[in-house]
Structures are given as structure tokens and as C-alpha cells.
Image (tube, rainbow, N blue to C red):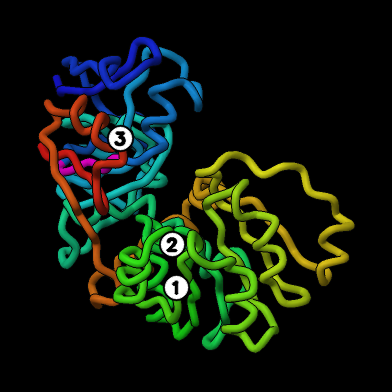
Amino acid sequence: MAKTVIIEETGGPEALKLVDREVGEPGPGEIRIRHKACGLNFIDVYQRTGLYPLELPHALGMEAAGIVEAVGEGVSHLKEGDRAAYAAVPPGAYCEARVMPAAQVCPLPDGVSFEDAASIMLQGLTVEYLFHRVWPLEKGAEVLFHAAAGGVGLIACQWAKSEGIRLIGTAGTDEKCKLALEKGAAECINYREKDFVPEVKALTGDKGVDVVMDGVGKDTFDKSLDCLKPLGMMMSFGNASGPVEPVSLLTLAQKGSLKLTRTTLFTFLADHDRCQEMAKHLFEKLESGAVTANIGQRFPLEEITEAHRQLEARKTTGSTILTL
């Protein structure tokens, strides 16, 4: 048996229930993992409230780290006793132990702690694919990154610096801009005080940036197109401010034959080999110190309701993890 957080109906944090569940043995292509730490993310809130529907009842949680307890037939990249971490579907990481598909579970090197891994898999793998899997970005490239002081943004600032990429960030306060700069952003624009389009043009000699990485969505999309140089790439990977309105292909042509993509992490992770390569790359960044995890608060699994309350109320800083 293992303590597991489930929802039987959608709703507020009070919908979260801690129950005992039978774990069982892994079948072909599966592993059983006993968690040491689990990560919390806003996608968990969206699933709990029904914005992202799940078949109920359902366990929640998208990332965790722990020890492999058992391995099913056909699994060759993991063995019993291995340290491991994942960001994977289906949800179910809020638990002491679980049986799950092995393909997206990744060996965790000794140099990365369970807590750091659990706090950074979703956000760190997002940054990895944005910088390396969507469009070729070379040293010296210029990138505009919105919400540069957010969880994904602070990793992106560090990642860009380690790759020799000039990252221009945006954030909503001077304090957040300062934080982004400390983490490696070359420049950061307080969008509440200045229009970021002319600022970006001024910072790039009126050329514009090679790539925009935008997890904000509706509020930043149109102006972001105006920040791109001809043949530039717009990477939309989130919709924190709401979904982007339909865009005409002619608009992309008129603004300089621009490229546009809307990506999701789990498309990239679906391929086993690519997923393992991405995780290895992330762990290398963590072990070298080029990227550091930023855990702002820890909650015992039993306090999951309070953890969700604070996360949803924007009272958390950095990453939030559940300890076991």
C-alpha cells in the first residue's frame, strides 16, 4: 500500500484526498518507483479544477524522483535500486510509490539530489527542448524570453548564459528584472513601465531577435511578432494569460516571413531515446553548476491541500516540492 493523492471530483484544494492504494507489480515496459520527493506545478491545479480534464477518480502530479523498486519485462535502461526521476504522463506522482510506464523515467546521477530533480524536471526539460529541439540556436543568437523571472524563465536565463546566447527577458517589476539579470539574462525589460517592442529594437540595433520564447500567450503574442527579425522564429509554449487568438498566415508574411510553432513538452518526451537524451543534458547542466534548482518551499505529502492553496494564491517562490 502507498499513500496517494487523488481527486474524485474537480474543485478547489479541498478536492484533494490522501488515500491508501495498492501498488502492485510492474508489467511489461513498466517500473515500480518509491518516491523521495515530488514536484508541484500549475498544470496540477488545472487538472484539479477541470480546466485540463481527467477521467475521474485520478491521481495527480507530473514529476518526481526516487528509487526503482522493481522492473518489468523489456525494460533495459533501469534496474532495481537505481536512482531515477521523471516528468511524465499519466499524472500520479503525488504518492509514496507507483507503478508506471518506464520509457520516460530517467536514470538520475548521484550528483543530482532527489529534491532538486523533483523540482526541475518539467521546467528544466521545457527549457532544454526550447533551446535545442525546436530551432537551431547557436552561440551569439539573441532570444526574447517573456516571464524571465518565473520558474521556467530563471532556468532559461541560466541556460542561455551557459550556451553563449544573449537572452533579453521581460518581467513585471524591477525586483523580478534584477533576479533575471542575476541568473544570466543579458537584459531585462520591466514591461509595466516600458513598451518592450521599442526596447527590444533598441537593444538589438533595430534588427530584432532571432527567436521569441513565449509562455504567456494572449497578452504578449502580437507584440512579440514585432520583436522578431525577418525569418525569425516565434515559439509559443504556454498560455498563462489566455490562449492566443487565431493568427493569419499573411501576418507572418507581412512581418518578415516569420516562422511560428506552438509546442508542448510531452510531444518531445514521447520518444524514449529523445526523452533520455534531454534528461541527460539537463542533469549535466545541474552537475556542472551551470543551472541550479530553486526550491522555495517544501510540504509533507500530508499537507498537499495547503500546498495547492499557496501555489494557486501565487504565494510561493521558486519551485515547490512534496517530501516523503
Whole-percent x, y for residue 155 in the image: 36, 65
The secondary structure that dominates the magenta segment is strand
Badge 3 amino acid: Ala
Badge 2 amino acid: Ala
Quarter that holds the N terminus = top left
Whole-percent x, y for residue 65 in the image: 22, 47
Magenta-highlighted residues = 36-40
Residue 318 occupies which quadrant of the picture? bottom left
Q: What residue would you read off at disc 1? A: 188
Q: Residue at position x 36%, y 67% from top?
A: 174
State the residue in front, 190 or 254.
190
Badge 1 amino acid: Cys
Real-space Cα distance between discs 2 and 1? 7 Å
Q: Are marks 2 and 1 in contact (CB under 8 Å)?
A: yes
| Secondary structure under the numbered disc 2 in the rendered image | strand
Q: Can you tell which mark lies on residue 171?
A: 2
* 196 in magenta: no
- Which comes before the other along the chain, label 1 or label 3? 1
Q: Can you tell which mark lies on residue 313?
A: 3
Real-space Cα distance between discs 3 and 2? 19 Å
Position of 283 compared to 160: left or right?
Answer: left
- Which comes before the other along the chain, label 3 or label 2? 2
